[in-house]
Image: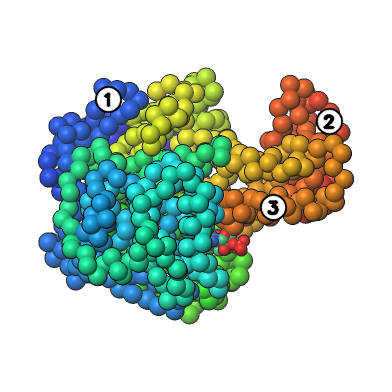
Amino acid sequence: MSSQAKYDEIYGESINQPDLFWGRAAGEIQWTKKWDRVLDDSNKPFYRWFVGGELNTCYNALDYHVENGRGDQNAIIYDSPVTGSVRKITYRELLDEVSRFAGGMASLGVTKGDTVIIYMPMIPEAAIAMLACARIGAIHSVVFGGFAPNELAIRINDAKPKLVVTASCGIEGKKVLPYKPLLDGAIGIASHKPEKCIIYQRPQVTAELTAGRDLSWSELMADAKPAACVPVAATDPLYILYTSGTTGRPKGVMRDNGGHAVALKWTMKNLYNINPGEVYWAASDVGWVVGHSYIVYAPLLYGCTTILYEGKPVGTPDPGAFWRVISEHGVSVLFTAPTAFRAIKKEDPQGEYLKKYDIHTLRYLFLAGERLDPDTYYWAGNMLKIPVIDHWWQTETGWGITGNCMGIDPFPIKAGSSTRPVPGYNVKIMDSEGIELPNGKEGYVVVRLPLPPGCMPTLWKDDERFLEYMEKIPGCYVTGDGGYFDKDGYIFIMGRIDDVINVAGHRLSTGSMEEILSRHPAVAECAVLGVNDQLKGQVPLGFVVLKAGIDRPAEEIEKEVVKMVRDEIGAVASFRQCLVVRALPKTRSGKTLRSTMRKIADGEEYIVPSTIDDASVLISITEAAQAIGYGKK
Ligand code: COA
Ligand code: AMP
């Protein structure tokens, strides 16, 4: 087993003496009241960190830096190739805008413990709204701009926001997408009605405001008095972020203030090996966990400059987009999803665009969000000539579970592996009975409790559903991913073992797509699988069986269900293909053989299950998949 002494020592302390380890890390955060206990384990598995402590996350991200000499340093560089603009906002300016927006929200009656939904494109106002909530102790819930009104409505009903903050439009490449009709649609469907909506009017679209309910961002800011930081308990919620589970009902991952600030600040040096004052770029979206943690909170808590990029890796305007941003702003660390690199590689395999830019400031490329395939790993490494670090994490944890800690004691990299557990995470591979498996054997990837600070302490108003993570193997958090440690102790994450898929780094639920398909009047039953895709890693592929007596053309129904998913979840689901088949393969007890179907669609070897009811169905599934280009080796 290869071993790095410093890592072993730090990792060992984090697992064996978590109080000592995290108590020391908490010294980097400014507290208005020191905690009584680092770890409260009196109500397992509801572990709580820094109990008794009080702080304000926004203070730590902004005021503290202004008070300590970073006022004139850029906090955010907003780089937007889709609007042809770059805007630099210093810590002092950001503090001013955040304090005034916080004051504006307070004037509308938003106060500590209230929830606010933020449905915004990638503009600085999204981060301003998040930080302003943190400033007054309100709980934000950012909803990804690519979600359709129905998904937004589900989140409005669950989070019950007093206020929704949105913009007049988002811009996706060349498409301008008005947001206000989406918001109105969502509020129309939702049973909970927010009292007020604040609309940031962008020059591309002017939204019509609903009298009595809506007001524009600029109107609110014009009269706003700056609000001071409200100290909150370390255990008070900072935000709720909804993520896909196995059903249509998303899970409201809750994040608290204290553990979150401590853990994220710790990762900046130890995992990413960056220094305060340097430029950190997470090319993601504020609607995802990566955006929360590494576009907004961690870089600002640590005194870095963060890049907020409104564009794509390709097409805005070309595959040199990332290299331009890195060279123009002197980026030191880039974090994105492998799919972004696959997109660049597809359009510029020889790296011709890279030759046009000087990207010498870039020290590391970190990738996460989906499996990093070895081809992409080698291509990125050969092009950039810097370490390419795969790290694995989830919305639930909010920061890396496994990775190669560049600031501690870097391990030699193995393609396909995310290296080692990050300090704080006691990662094990177990079978379904909770028996630990030896190196080399694949099983459930679990984390022995307690999860470290910053991970979800529970799901929003749903302790029962939170407990489901711990039900299968008591004392452990079951991540939902499968994987193994190799003989050298390197971890390999092999993919989800449930109905969650990752499409272009976006987490989606096939279960929720099946719920939509089954509502089509002609559909008797259906299955949606995540199949391999060269660009997006995975894409959903649907199969439907029609009710007896339906004699409409299959293509018509296929188109209709594709449209239903796009309308109800959003374009981001990338649900583009659905096949009408005569039957789904099932066991004699009636269970759909989804994993066999997935192997067929991916052209992988499979064993015909002995429990199958009618093996001939597999042939018709194979033929259908092959007819649209799947199912071939
Ligand atoms: N608002 C509205 N629509 C959005 C959206 C948003 N924020 N994000 C994506 N969409 C739409 C896209 O326009 C596209 O619509 P279309 O079907 O009309 O073409 C659809 O959702 C699918 O989007 P996506 O899967 O992103 O595909 P793409 O072809 O537009 O782009 C990549 C492909 C690889 C360039 C893109 O997925 C990418 O940059 N990925 C980076 C991954 C990332 O940021 N992951 C976050 C976790 S780290
Ligand atoms: P999300 O909650 O959106 O961050 O998605 C989490 C899921 O993405 C994980 O459970 C994994 O299935 C997948 N994932 C994230 N990072 C990686 C990675 N580095 N390697 C493999 N899978 C990953």
Which disc number belongs to residue 41? 1
Q: Mark 3 points at which residue?
A: 562
- Residue 343 position, x and y percent, is 58, 64
Give whichever of 317, 201 is nearer the camera.
201
Q: Nearer the viewer, mark 2 or mark 3?
A: 3
Residue type of the residue flagged with mark 3: Val
Q: Residue at x 14, y 32 (%)?
A: 36
Q: Which residue is drawn at 26% across and 39% down?
A: 236
Q: Is residue 487 visible?
A: no
Q: What element carries label 1?
A: loop
Q: Mark 2 points at which residue?
A: 615
Residue type of the residue flagged with mark 1: Asp
Q: Which residue is drawn at 49% across and 77% down?
A: 355
Q: Which quadrant of the figure has residue 315?
A: bottom right
Q: Earlier in the sequence, mark 1 or mark 2?
A: 1
Label 3 C-beta lies within 8 Å of the nearest ligand 1 atom: no
Disc 2, disc 3: CB below 8 Å?
A: no
Compared with 144, 470 (above or below) is: above
Q: Which residue is drawn at 30% across and 61% down?
A: 128
Q: Earlier in the sequence, mark 2 or mark 3?
A: 3
Seen in the image, is 131 located left or right of residue 612?
left
Give whichever of 25, 487 is nearer the camera.
25
Label 2 C-beta lies within 8 Å of the nearest ligand 2 atom: no
